[in-house]
Image: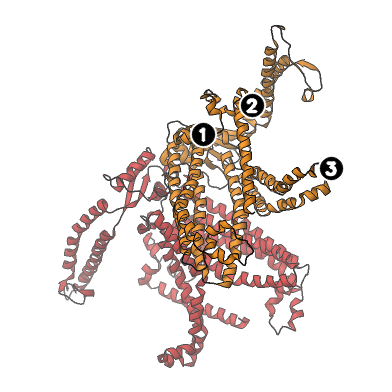
Chain colours: A red, B orange
Amino acid sequence: MDFNSFLTSLGTSFLICVVLMFLFTWLARKPGNEVVYYPNRILRGLDPSEGGRRTRNAFAWIKDAFSATEAGVVEAAGVDAAVYLVFLSSVLGILVLSGIVLLPVLIPVAGTDHNVNAHAENSNGTFNNLDKISMGNVQEESPRLWAFLLGTYWVSFVTFYVLWKAYKHVSNLRAVARSSPEVKPEEFTVLVRDVPRAPPDQTIKDHVDSYFRALHPETFYRSMVVTDNKEVNKIWEEIEGYKKKLARAEVVYAESKTTSNPNGTRPTNRTGFLGLIGPKVDTVDYCSEKIKELLPKLEAEQKLTLREKQQAAALVFFNKRPAAVLASQTIHAQMLDTWTVMEAPEPEQLLWTNLPKKLYEREVRQSIVYGVVFLTVVFYMIPISFISAITTLENLRKLLPFLKVIVDREAIKTVLEAYLPQLALIIFLALLPTFLMFLSKAEGIPSEGHAVRAASGKYFYFVIFNVFLGVTVGGALFASLKIIIDRPGQIVQMLGTSLPGNATFFLTFVALKYCSHLPHLLGCC
Amino acid sequence: MDFNSFLTSLGTSFLICVVLMFLFTWLARKPGNEVVYYPNRILRGLDPSEGGRRTRNAFAWIKDAFSATEAGVVEAAGVDAAVYLVFLSSVLGILVLSGIVLLPVLIPVAGTDHNVNAHAENSNGTFNNLDKISMGNVQEESPRLWAFLLGTYWVSFVTFYVLWKAYKHVSNLRAVARSSPEVKPEEFTVLVRDVPRAPPDQTIKDHVDSYFRALHPETFYRSMVVTDNKEVNKIWEEIEGYKKKLARAEVVYAESKTTSNPNGTRPTNRTGFLGLIGPKVDTVDYCSEKIKELLPKLEAEQKLTLREKQQAAALVFFNKRPAAVLASQTIHAQMLDTWTVMEAPEPEQLLWTNLPKKLYEREVRQSIVYGVVFLTVVFYMIPISFISAITTLENLRKLLPFLKVIVDREAIKTVLEAYLPQLALIIFLALLPTFLMFLSKAEGIPSEGHAVRAASGKYFYFVIFNVFLGVTVGGALFASLKIIIDRPGQIVQMLGTSLPGNATFFLTFVALKYCSHLPHLLGCC
């Protein structure tokens, strides 16, 4: 990519950004769109149009975001959001602290050397002006290279320092959240999986109760066994659907009562497929009747489910926070594959269908998913390249002749020719996170948040393999092979440069892993 | 090694064995040696010569060992010994169950083929009769190879089955030991390391007490802080030395009181270096005086140590077994490097000097030790080969001319020439476990048993690398490379053969790891 094309691309992106921002401002100012743009404010009982027009422009949120305190963020969006902001500020900190020292030092060091000029004559102009302030402009075996070597150590030092601060900060955030007087249900709860077969005269619930009451006689409160709610949910959703329809029909009926028509027109609908066929009925009466009919059925099914459809997983509640923490981190059974306990996720995070999956099933699923992820990471670029190659304008015209009318126009042709090959890349990369999330859930992970972390991890390996390994290491490998053949003395220098970089990279990964998921701490209860 | 030399070696070993056994029988029958040969019986108050001469022969213990029940083994030598016996019987079980099926099937399958005979003519007699009943006698691409393929799957199946039984068995053994009414001190104890700096007005003991009393208000009993006992130990050992001397002197004095000399001769010794120089004193008086002198010094030093020399580690005792188990498996502090808890080892197993080592020091030590182990595993054979090469008889005669007199005798020469090159190997391999144990203790591991496990792990890698990788894989690799070049179709067959073998190997390792160190189980308390 040459410099002009880079600027053009930058300009296009900026233009799209400005257009979208104006669209946002325009739409957000329409009072009817308040429920779309300010749902959080409405839910918290604030006036969505507070502050008048000023809060409705596309830049107001930036001021809000900068003036927000960390305590405010924790209160509004939880610890996770605050931790995410700590990550972002850590990355910014590493960038700024490195740049403050390195830019004023290294740019003059490189800029005042003459390697590029010396080579420019016999290289057919493959160098540009940006290269003159890069390491490439330093002459071979020049003492100036020490500045760059020290530079990598400075970046490492900055990274370690910032990460250490971030770790402590996140740790404190979590400790404050844990020790807050505002109790949360998951702090009293332990998730139990792989409940073994109950004795013949007991239900699974009795089994769980007796087991945990025996092991935690003073702190066990009660248990809730996971049930297979498929049937109940179906009926419940049906009832909810009729309730919505009823509410809407009542509003329509009320609004139809104008002065000219004081009785209004009762709304009607057909009972068949999509309301298109079948006998016509009065909607209000029909829905009320249906709800009345379904409610006892729901209750009967609920009772049946609680009694008959208990699954081999349960949530066990304790009467003290420390007791739940102690229990969630302790092995409860002699055999590895029974009574697996773990800290309970937040109630809304539970992936209920994954809870009753058995240990061996989870292990097998995990192995299969890891295999699929490996194939995805390594071979994902192949179909993209293939599709990119065949979806050129020329090929499309040949394969889909009816497109000729559009494609032959000059303006459309220019734009399409520029963006078509990238389209496959953009679409496939957009689909990737969804696919990885699907895979993570298929592993049998018990909570939404954990599945998100697992998907992020998979995405991380994807990025590492395709960007870091493919581009950076691939290039460096060829370069180093060339150096090994040409001049073995430089390998030591190269190792000195790459060592702190790789260590930084590795430690960043480890630190993020630690920060993002620490187990419950007894010391903070 | 040809077959005759193999038989000779076997014969030599058998002869040595028989000689040693007769030596054992002869020595064990002397009444004065009872304390050496039957210490356990004497300690348990049994008569060492019980059963007369029959129990004193070299084979009686075999009958005893076979008639011992598992409960008896657990009682006499603990769960660990019983687990070890389970390992041995598992290995025997795998061998026997595999052999019962495979030997009668595979030997005839191989023995009735003619591959060796077909090749014997143009191979200068590199085959012998043993080769005729091995897989090498099966002709290439013969359907008989399927029998060997199925054989490997049979071995795998047997291994999985036996290991699964052994796992359950060991698990039950542990559960029984844990739930026995006979309580052990370590079951109520948690080992706490990385105690952070105490507030200025508190000792470390107060700090530990207040921290654990706050977290476990109902179950905390008391704590014992690790102290630096170096000075106290020195004084105590001095006192013990004098006590032993005193006891011996008193016995000598009593025995010297014969009828001819009713007053006896009071034993004397010199006070200087090794009792060789210095003034001569009466031993009984001198030792009693010294003990009297040292006792108050010991008491003063003990008090000082308890108060001043507290280290950053402690044993915390609970008033219930489940409380200790729960506490030992739970994270106790916000920062990773403070208040590290773990289950307490048996009191006599504690490596006291390792307890106060800080987390970072342990990590650094571990890294260094792992580096040293890597070098040891990979390069241990090099000095052995080197020394073996130079310690041939010829070289020794050149280097140490005074040996000529011995070495030139024909009989000695024969023996030395046969065993000298192996001597270096034997000596170095005998030193290896001691060296690995030293390295494991240097890691900062808190208990003797854990250090033994760590040393065994290191030894395992040594065996894997030097035997398995060096011999088996090295050979197979060359063979497979040859096959890849010659006939790619056979690779699938090779993979089919090696897959279950490698899986078995890996699973055996995992199973041993699991069996040998399971954490405490709450369900068995």
Q: Amino acid at mark 1?
A: Ala
The residue that label 2 is drawn on is: B302
Q: Secondary structure at mark 1?
A: helix
Q: Position of residue B42 (x, y in %)?
A: 55, 24
Disc 1 and disc 3: Cα gap in Å? 51 Å
Q: Is residue B308 above or below residue A330?
A: above
Q: Both on one chain, marks 2 and 1?
A: yes
Q: Which residue is mark 1?
A: B77
User: How far apart are the two marked residues, 2 and 1, measured between alpha carbons?
Assistant: 34 Å
Mark on residue B402?
Answer: 3
Q: Residue at x 43, y 68 (%)?
A: A434
In terms of sequence position, does the residue under pointer 2 or pointer 3 come before the other? 2
Determine contact: label 2, label 1, CB under 8 Å: no
**Residues packed near mark 1 inside 10 Å, few (<14), some (14 to 19) or many (20 plus):** few
Residue A449 seen anywhere in this rendered image of the structure: no
Q: Are marks 1 and 3 on the same chain?
A: yes
Question: Which one is earlier in the sequence, the residue at label 2 or at label 1?
Answer: 1
- Amino acid carrying label 3: it is Phe
- Mark nearest the camera among 2 and 3 is 3
Say which quarter of the image contains residue A134.
Answer: bottom right
* Pointer 2 local density, CA inside 10 Å: few below 14, some 14–19, many at least 20: many
- Camera-side mark, 2 or 1: 1
Residue flagged by tag 2: what amino acid is it?
Gln
Q: Position of residue B285 (x, y in %)?
A: 72, 14
